[in-house]
Amino acid sequence: VHCDYFPDSKSGTPGADNYKVKGNLHWVSARHAYHAEVRLYDRLFLVPQPGAGEADYRGEINPEAKRVIEARLEPSLAQAQAEERFQFERHGYFVADRVDSRPGAPVFNRAVGLRDSWGKQGGGQ
């Protein structure tokens, strides 16, 4: 892989607007990455109207509604404050948990995913 490094391309810094987002790749070195707990929340139920008709709503609970992973993140995220929000590229918007985050060890919860095709698949509206 051949690449060029642009240290002034970080979002929110002077000069960052000079770069096309779709033409850049964000890469985090495994050696320097910050290891953090990340919680990926999805819909609680597998169907739009749980318990409708004869169905028992407990059988319609999404077993993947909450997944907890250990992610490798940019080192600066270790300093995130409780309730501070971030966009994790290609994954969605995340917030540092106000209860479980500790100084130097934030826990991130996904608040909103970037793409949602559930409604298009007939599951929602």
Image (tube, rainbow, N blue to C red):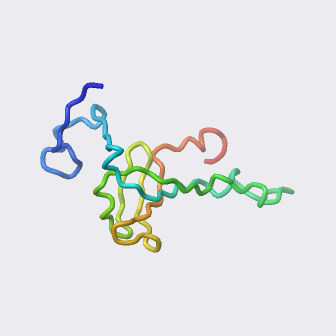
Residue displayed at 44% across by 63% down: 107
Position of 79 with respect to 106 (left or right) is left
Residue displayed at 38% across by 45% down: 89
Looking at the rendered image, the quarter that the N terminus falls into is: top left
Residue 5: name its quadrant: top left
Residue displayed at 33% across by 46% down: 31
Q: Name the outermost residue toward the left.
A: 14
Position of 59 with respect to 93 (left or right) is right
Residue 122: name its quadrant: top right
Task: Return the x and y of residue 99 as percentages of the image width and height.
Answer: 46, 74
Marks counted in the figure total 0
Q: Name the outermost residue toward the top.
A: 2
Nearer to me, 31 or 98 = 31
Task: Return the x and y of residue 63 as percentages of the image width and height.
Answer: 68, 54
Nearer to me, 78 or 89 = 78
Q: Name the outermost residue toward the bottom.
A: 99
Task: Return the x and y of residue 7 as percentages of the image width and height.
Answer: 17, 43
Nearer to me, 8 or 21 = 8
Q: Name the outermost residue toward the right.
A: 54
